[in-house]
Amino acid sequence: MTRHHPRPRPLAALLALGLVVAATALVWARAGAGPDRCVERAERAEQRSELVTGTGPEVLVIGDSYSVGAGVQPDQSWPVRLPGRVRVDGFSGSGFSAGASGCGDLSYATRAPRSLRTTTRLVVVEGGLNDTDQPVADLEGGARRLLRLLDGRRVLVVGPPATPDRTWGEVARVDATLQRLAGEYGASYLSMLDADLTYQDDDLHPDPAGHREFGDIVAAQVEAMLTSS
């Protein structure tokens, strides 16, 4: 029997493979994510999507770890405080920008089509903290893409809170950009810069009391929008 030995790879191919591996590792390191971490986030996102709360007009929440409820129980996450029949499409580490997540393009505009339904009465888009280190052009491009996709629907954009883990300038820049774009596309905007939240030990994610406060602030705006439509 003739035994075929594998041919050695050309140097160029080996270098290219090394660059791909290095680039992937760099992306994971930048976002604090890796293959296992991304799987965990995807599983938690799936679990949160299965929790549908309330009754009445259908409300879809698109967001990040705040919407998922990172560090708290799913039924303690702020979207459970909203009126209506609430569904959540959340993914930890994601944002408006395509590069916000280290787990691939999980931007809101990329994910929205899978969750939108003809029966969706109101879309609540929450986030921005994971966009604070992204180029303004990427943040703006991702937000415009999402708002164009949601054209014709009632939309409430909920901006990022001023967490201890981020500088005021970083959060305020994102807040101002999102507020301007929401106005351009006829969406409602709710700034959370002045929200007095309490946080977990990481100084980034709200604790159960912080989620209640966050949810009650958003709920008041959602209630007003649902009753006026």
Image: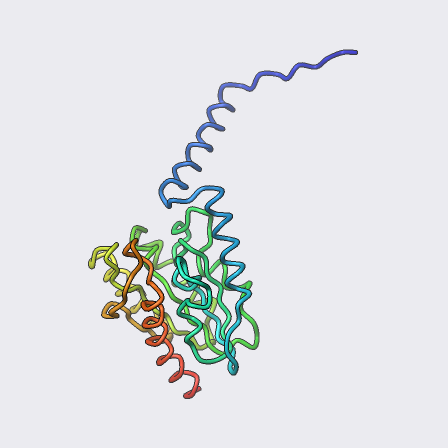
Please identify the quadrant where the C terminus is shown. bottom left
Q: Which of 219 and 191 is in front in this view?
A: 219
Task: Identify the residue at image location x=29%, y=55%.
Answer: 201
Residue 30 sits in which quadrant?
top left
> Picture coordinates of residue 4 (x, y %)?
70, 14
Residue 92 lies, with reference to residue 54, above or below; the image says above
> Picture coordinates of residue 106 (x, y %)?
46, 54
> Picture coordinates of residue 170 (x, y %)?
24, 56
Q: Is 108 left or right of 218, judged from the image as shown?
A: right
Residue 83 sits in which quadrant?
bottom left
Give the number of marks. 0
Residue 224 lies, with reference to residue 143, above or below; the image says below
Residue extending furthest top?
A: 2
Task: Identify the residue at image location x=35%, y=69%.
Answer: 158
Q: How is the image coloured?
A: rainbow
Residue 72 sits in which quadrant?
bottom left
> Picture coordinates of residue 140 (x, y %)?
34, 59
Please identify the quadrant where the N terminus is shown. top right
Residue extending furthest right?
A: 1
Q: Nearer the viewer, residue 87 or 80?
A: 80
Residue extending furthest bottom?
A: 228
Q: Is 100 left or right of 88, judged from the image as shown?
A: left
